[in-house]
Image (tube, rainbow, N blue to C red):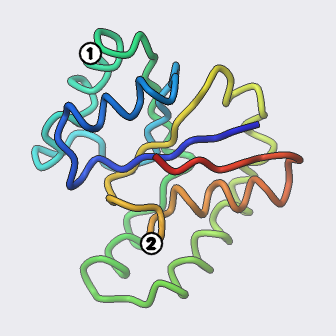
Amino acid sequence: MEIFTIGFTKSSAAEFFGRLRIAGIRKLMDVRLNNRSQLAGFAKRDDLAFFLREICQADYEHQPLLAPNQEMLDEYKKNGGEWADYEQRFFRLMEQRHIETVLTPDDFKPATVLLCSEATADHCHRRLVIEYLQQHWPDIHPMHL
């Protein structure tokens, strides 16, 4: 099973929605804790749901279960925390939340993309979500758009 990921920063709306269309995405799972920020531009929750429906014929779902908590975000982003510490804390949080039992592989059908703000998946929790799920579900293949 392929699970796609995408970030919206450093992308125009045309580039962003174009990548989703080319990949055949039918559901976007928003894994941001805060999905209403004015800084998000075209990726604000309500606007994003509209654009997905109109441009990609895709559904929108906010999934805060797959988001870090505010304390973790602040420590890493605002206080200059280390990425390795953030990774460990986020993996522990996913374990505590038992995301592999709350969600199932069927939640990622049809073609689903995890959305966060980071331009690349290298230092983004959306990559960590997939790595965690790979430890619990067979045959997951990440596709970073």
- Within 10 Å of disc 1 (Cα), the crowding (few <14, some 14-19, many 20+) is some
Q: Which residue: 68% across, 23% down?
A: 109
Residue 48 vs 118, above or below: the answer is above
| Residue 117 left/right relative to 114 | left
Q: Residue furthest front?
A: 22
The amino acid sitting under disc 1 is: Phe
Q: Which mark is residue 128?
A: none
Check disc 2 and give the amino acid type: His
Q: Residue at x 64, y 20 (%)?
A: 110
Tell me the quadrant of the picture where the N terminus can be found.
Answer: top right
Q: CA distance from mark 1 to mark 2?
A: 28 Å
Read off the residue under disc 2: 123
Q: Residues within 10 Å of mark 2 (few under 14, many from 20)?
A: some
Compared with residue 67, is residue 80 higher up or lower down, i.e. above or below? below
The residue positioned 56% from the left and 41% from the top of the image is 4
Give the quadrant of residue 107: top right
Q: Secondary structure at mark 1?
A: helix
Q: Earlier in the sequence, mark 1 or mark 2?
A: 1
Name the residue that disc number 1 marks: 50
Q: Position of residue 142 (x, y in %)?
A: 65, 50
**What secondary structure is found at the residue carrying circle 2?**
loop
Front position in the image: 80 or 5: 5
